[in-house]
Image: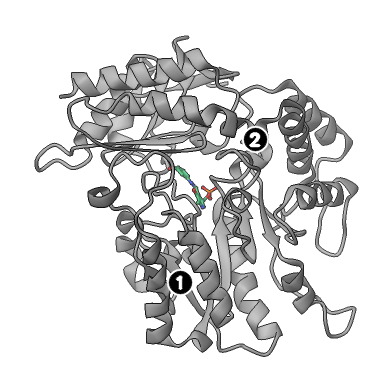
Amino acid sequence: MNARITPAAAKTDLDAFWMPFTANRQFKGQPRLLARAEGMHYWTAEGRQVLDGVAGLWCVNAGHGRREITEAVTKQIGAMDFAPTFQMGHPIAFELANRLAAIAPPGMDRVFFTNSGSESVDTALKIAIAYHRARGQGQRTRLIGRERGYHGVGFGGMSVGGMVNNRKFFASVMLPSVDHLQHTLDIGHNAFSRGLPHWGMHLANDLERLVALHDASTIAAVIVEPIGGSAGVILPPVGYLKRLREICDKHDILLIFDEVITGFGRIGKPFAALEFDVIPDIMTTAKGLTNGAIPMGAVFAQRKIYDAFMQGPENAIELFHGYTYSAHPVACAAALATLDIYEREGLLTRAATLSPEWQEALHSIRGTPNVIDIRNFGLIGAVDLEPRAGKPGARGFEVFLKCFEKGVLIRVTGDIVALSPPLIIESKQIAQIVETLAGAIRETA
Ligand code: PXG
């Protein structure tokens, strides 16, 4: 526990850690240190309670400090701390894959383990390209992402991603054969939509434009987040994902859903593919898989994808890909305990029950000065703020700091507030998040 490091501590205490996606100098001048977590709350290093409005980073779906996960991890690390999964195996890796296959969208019952969302994405992209080669279509190497998409920070995920700040420093070292669909956020048509926006299904036809430009025979896969998270909660218009699926089918292009955020109950079904009744060929997950307790990711593939690799001599390795820690036994134990909790407490569908109340509460912020859009689906929410003139992101960051001071942790990306609380949230906590946020927005008018 880092409770010894307080904001009053010497500045050098904070120097060595080069923090990810953080304004290091701002943070180290004015640190915000979390020291303990339980249920819906964090406690700061000074002992102040903070309501977690973002499930850590969209990952702690069952709430913090779940005893069963702690116990499962402790027991496993005592029994077997590590075991290789290259040419070897251990039982709970197979048990976990079977448990995941049982809740997966229909047919997606082959599971490849990773340690993060970024690794899941790069794994999925490699599987897609290798799949086409395995069936004699090795010229299909092009990948299609989407503007404002986020698929982690590996070279593959960065290349198919569409957030400019994540790309611009690395422009010349992106994967070469990548193109992007236009994104689906259109406040002009869809401001304050409740649930999915009704305008914009036709945006999926942008894929036909890219097919016409590159020819389908060069395209391996399309990757999208069913609901975009990091770029500020970007919803698919009604019918959009189905249309993407149809176009992919027509041209024999694989469809990859990046469900790192939407997976494991965030939107009211175990996976967005089930909610939207659109089954991809490959699906990436991480985060909620272990409730954030131990790093782990999982890539789900349709059986036809796996089967395409299972040819040639039986003693030949079929896919030259994997991580030292693929199916790490301690992560597997954490994931199994997490799935037990999700199932016993009905958390994979609880967001659907809470969603009407969540929607009403969020939209009550409408009318507050500088609020230009509100979006919601399942237990995800976003509030778009009017940027301060000439200072993009300033208002968002002020609102973030004010909420933290007032005891609620939110996320901001630029001037968009994103919310994704643990799925165990209670009504009074929904009200607390919304009241605190509305107050913070008013105070930064
Ligand atoms: N795909 C998606 C859709 C994600 O949201 C990743 C891949 C990468 O996962 P890893 O585990 O490599 O970070 C993500 C991660 C935010 C935020 O505040 C979102 C993520 C990570 C950190 C912050 O929106 N998503």
Residue 183: % across, % down:
35, 60
Residue 241: % across, % down:
50, 60
In the image: residue 334, left or right of residue 79: left
The amino acid type of the residue labelled 2 equals Thr
Disc 1 versus disc 2: nearer the observer: 2
Residue at x 45% of width, y 60% of height: 240
177 up-or-down from 375: above or below: below
Residue 408: % across, % down:
40, 19
In the image: residue 383, left or right of residue 388: right
The amino acid type of the residue labelled 1 equals Ile
In the image, 242 versus 111, the foreground residue is: 242
Residue 268: % across, % down:
59, 38
In the image, 219 versus 268, the foreground residue is: 268
Q: Is mark 2 within 8 Å of ligand 1?
A: no
Q: Could you tell me if residue 283 is visible in this image?
A: yes
308 up-or-down from 298: above or below: below
Mark 2 element type? helix
Mark 1 element type? strand
Q: Could you tell me if residue 44 is visible in this image?
A: no
Q: Earlier in the sequence, mark 1 or mark 2?
A: 1
Farthest residue to the left: give it.
389
245 up-or-down from 346: above or below: below
Which of the labelled discs sits on residue 349, or is there none? Answer: 2
Q: How many marks?
A: 2
Residue at x 42% of width, y 49% of height: 235
Name the residue tied to disc 1.
144
The colour scheme is one colour
Question: Looking at the figure, which quarter contains the N terminus?
Answer: top right
Q: Would you call the spot at circle 1 few (<14 residues within 10 Å), some (14-19), or many (20 or more)?
A: many
245 up-or-down from 26: above or below: below
